[in-house]
Amino acid sequence: MIDVERVDYIRVPVTDIEEANHFYGEVLGLERNPNSPGDDWVEYEVGNLTLAVMTPHTHEYEFAPLPPATIALRVPDLEAAKAELESAGLEVTEIWDSGVCRGMGVSDPAGNRILLHHRYAPYPDGTTP
């Protein structure tokens, strides 16, 4: 058996690293890892996960955006997040409600669809997220 310790990072392909750094670092306010390996691979720490924002053409493969909602980021207040994203000039979907959680979608500058999400209902065992 392989002893997997954790998910180390999710690679997020982008077409323009400066636009991506603005989106992930300034608009979303994610913490940039000061030990990121280069200007074409910037890591952002998100709680228990690292998003590795990178330019595929400098890593020997072609750009293709992630499938929709590959990344879901938990936020405490969807309305506040929506207002902040819209004030930054981004187009955000309407907030939806599944009966256990609420969410909305936004695209980064490269077209990767990011889901902002908040679960409000407890899990079947009574624990809360």
Image: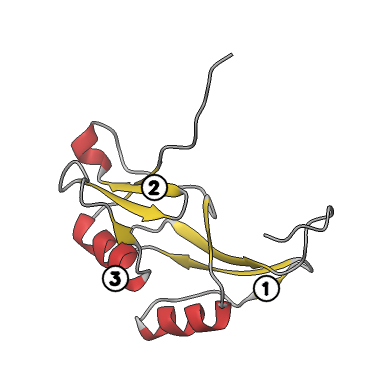
**Kind of residue at badge 1:** Trp
As helix, strand or loop, the secondary structure at mark 2 comes to strand
**Kind of residue at badge 2:** Thr
Q: Is residue 55 above or below residue 102?
A: above
Count of number-bearing discs:
3
In screen coordinates, is 67 left or right of 101?
Answer: left
Q: Residue at x 60, y 78 (%)?
A: 94
Label 3, residues with CA under 10 Å away: few <14, some 14-19, many ≥20: few
Taking depth in this image into account, of 110 and 4 the one nearest to the observer is: 4
Image coordinates of residue 83 in percent, x first then y, are 47, 85
Label 2, residues with CA under 10 Å away: few <14, some 14-19, many ≥20: some
Residue with the most extreme left position = 39
As helix, strand or loop, the secondary structure at mark 1 comes to strand
| Residue that carries the numbered disc 1 in the rendered image | 96
Image coordinates of residue 114 in percent, x first then y, are 48, 60
| Residue that carries the numbered disc 3 in the rendered image | 26
Image coordinates of residue 97 in percent, x first then y, are 72, 72
| Residue that carries the numbered disc 2 in the rendered image | 50
As helix, strand or loop, the secondary structure at mark 3 comes to helix
Taking depth in this image into account, of 1 and 51 the one nearest to the observer is: 1
- Asked if the residue under mark 1 is in contact with the one under mark 2, i.e. CB atoms within 8 Å, the reply is no
Quarter of the figure with the C terminus: bottom right
**Kind of residue at badge 3:** Glu
Front of the two marks 2 and 1: 2
Quarter of the figure with the N terminus: top right
Taking depth in this image into account, of 80 and 20 the one nearest to the observer is: 80
Front of the two marks 1 and 3: 3
Q: Residue at x 83, y 52 (%)?
A: 125
Q: CA distance from mark 2 to mark 1?
A: 26 Å
Report if residue 65 is visible in the image. Answer: no
